[in-house]
Image (spheres, helix red, strand yellow):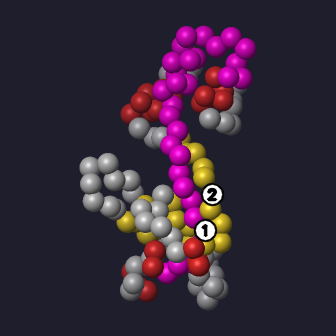
Amino acid sequence: MIFACHSAQATAMLAAPTDSEREVLGDIGWQRNEVVLHSDPRWLPERQRARASWNYRLSDGDRARACVTYNMNILRGCPRAPLFCVTLNPDAPVDDRYVWQRFVYEHPLFNPQSWSAQLRRED
């Protein structure tokens, strides 16, 4: 059986999950991600030639999370269209004057624990 949902939701859908099912599904974690659709050029490299489809920014600190801004104009093949960017987990506020929409998504964590759980999916 295939579930297209969060692992915790899949566990809740099972009438009587086995210990093995609880363990495997419990090892697949999720991370909350803030997503901002905007047109703020400050989230892209200043030099036009340095701009890419995916633009990474790393903060200082041991627990810093990567921040990525997708340049939708490049991804959609519309270089002359008005600027549209999607920033995932902004490490600073995006100027509200440029914000079109804010979203919160939860994405699966791809780490050794979740990879191991995938190998045990038949359990």
The reply to whether residue 83 is visible in this rendering is: yes
Q: Is residue 104 left or right of residue 3?
A: left
Quadrant into which the C terminus falls: top right
Circle 2 crowding by C-alpha within 10 Å: few under 14, some 14–19, many from 20: few
Magenta stretch contains residue 27:
yes
**In the foreground, 36 or 114:** 36
**In the foreground, 39 or 74:** 39
Question: Residue, x 48% and y 27% (percent of image)?
Answer: 27
Question: Residue, x 51% and y 60% (percent of image)?
Answer: 88
Magenta stretch: give its range: 12-41
Disc 1 + disc 2, Cβ < 8 Å? yes
Give the vertical position of 6 relative to 117 (above or below): below
Amino acid found under the numbered disc labelled 2: Phe
Q: In this view, does 66 lie to the left or right of 85?
A: left
SS at mark 2 in the image: strand
Question: Residue, x 68% and y 37% (percent of image)?
Answer: 4
Q: Where is residue 92 in the image (x, y as percent from the top left)?
A: 43, 66
Give the residue pinned by disc 1: 37
